[in-house]
Amino acid sequence: MTRGSESNNPGRHEPDAKVRRLQRKLYVAAKQRQERRFHALYDRLCRSDVLHEAWERVKRNKGAAGVDGVTLEAVEQYGVERLLSGLRDELHAGEYRAPPVLRRYIPKADGKQRPLGIPTVKDRIVQTAAKLVLEPIFEADFMSSSFGFRPRRSTLQALEMIRETVNAGSHHVLDADIRDYFGTIDQTVLMERVARRVSDRRVLKLLRGWLQAGVMEGGTYSETVSGTPQGGVISPLLSNIYLHFLDTVWQRQCAGIGTLVRYADDFVVLCRSREAVEEAERRVRIIFGRLKLTLHPEKTRRVDLTEGKEGFDFLGCHLHMRMSGKLWEEQRLRRYYLQRWPSKRSMKRVRTRVKELTDSRRNGVKDVDVLIHDLNPVLRGWGGYFSTGNAARKFRQLDKYVVRRLNMFRWRRHRRHAKPGQRIHWAREDYEARGLYRLRGTIRYPKPCMLHREVPPVSRVRETRTHGLKGGGGDRAA
């Protein structure tokens, strides 16, 4: 697993030195005594340096206003010091109450909508302060199988763990999906899990307040009796605390069945046989019975990766085993290696975004340079995420699609000036000269896979060619 990759933890940066020392102190204390319950955390949450650090993170992560309509700009106009001072006094006096979250919806890949709860700026500051204090304590307990929304852990590490485990012989996968996870979390069970480490009643009261704050939608208030609101700063930590029970039980009692790789509420179990993956599903259902969760009957599936029979999607990638053509040509060896490339949903999503940005009906946009300026951050961010896999073919497809969309935009602008029968065409080099970001040639693999010792060592370049890391794998249809 690649340890040097960047964290997926939102807003991660090096905190204030005092805050960092506090976090380190809490982490070491929790690591040294696994049975310890922390009782004096609320005062640390209210510290000036912690609240200032919380504000800096909230500001950096941006975000919309909550139910009170107060934006980040409005806070700066009001005065950050003034707000934090009043918030600190409110917390010390025990008068702070979590306001309802503002309900908003974002589209999902399957056409449905995902509900989000947007806290107020003030509430996001308090949630971030609580996270700064609580996260080190629970990080001391979290297992290595958990990768989502944790400091110095990333999607790349999760994908690399899957790649190495599959290439070592675990070709049977339980691709699990939890039915309505964030909406079905049992709040009582969750608070019991938190209370195993935290005995500070004021902190526990604060957490309950966020869980039961309610939702404001269309001017109508509704209570929340189960689940955790998606969109809150503290929600990912609470999610990991809740599913830590799965990680712990699996490590202690089920590790011999298969390898668990979990990213927030998405997880897979990698097994060596069909019987093992069936047993893995049975064990997961038993554990979920304790957590009052259920597997989605339609989306949960058992996948046989052997010799490329099937594949599965995880974290936006499609994972599939492909035979090494080079080894077959040179040594007549059938070697299959796990490869990954953008899933169909990921390709559809980025194409939709490119189409939106290159629509000739965009108001006031007449210059192709404006489109290139808007496209580059999308292409750079999307390409950066998928650049560590076998995505070369997909990258070429998207490069061609971008050029085609830009040509269509320019053609509609220039066709009135074209002569009859004249074909207007612009090559990709013309757009690259204008600064268009190119995906082709940006593939990089974190490290070579050298599991089969009978294959002689090769250079990095030869290894890339041998195991098909030029993106040769992948479904032909985007």
Image (tube, rainbow, N blue to C red):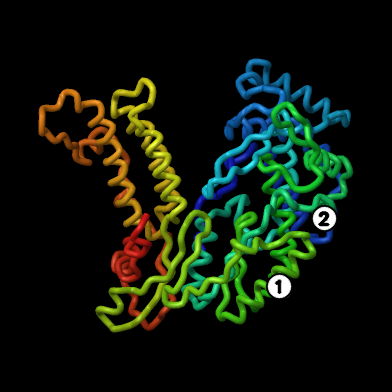
Q: Which residue is mark 1?
A: 283
How far apart marks 2 and 1 lie (CA) works out to 20 Å
Q: Secondary structure at mark 1?
A: helix
Residue 125 visible in the displayed image: no
Relative to 94, residue 200 above or below: below
Looking at the rendered structure, the kind of residue marked 1 is Arg
The kind of secondary structure element at disc 2 is: helix
Q: Is 373 on the left-hand or right-hand side of 434?
A: right
Which mark is first along the chain, 1 or 2?
A: 2
Mark 2 belongs to which amino acid? Answer: Val
Closer to the camera in the image, 127 or 216: 216
Whether 190 is drawn above or below 355: the answer is: below
Give residue 321's position: percent from left, percent from top: 42, 71
Q: Residue at x 28, y 74 (%)?
A: 326
Q: Do the CB atoms of the residues marked 2 and 1 lie less than 8 Å apart?
A: no
Q: Residue at x 57, y 71 (%)?
A: 302
Q: How far across and down, in percent of the image, does residue 358 sit?
A: 35, 33
Dot 2 corresponds to which residue?
Answer: 189
Q: Quadrant of residue 342?
A: bottom left
Q: Nearer the viewer, residue 135 or 263?
A: 263
Furthest residue to the front? Answer: 420
Residue at the spot 35% in from the left edge and 58% down from the top edge: 477
Relative image position of residue 375 (x, y in whole percent):
37, 36
**Closest to the observer, 24 or 153:** 153
* Residue 364 seen anywhere in this rendered image of the structure: yes
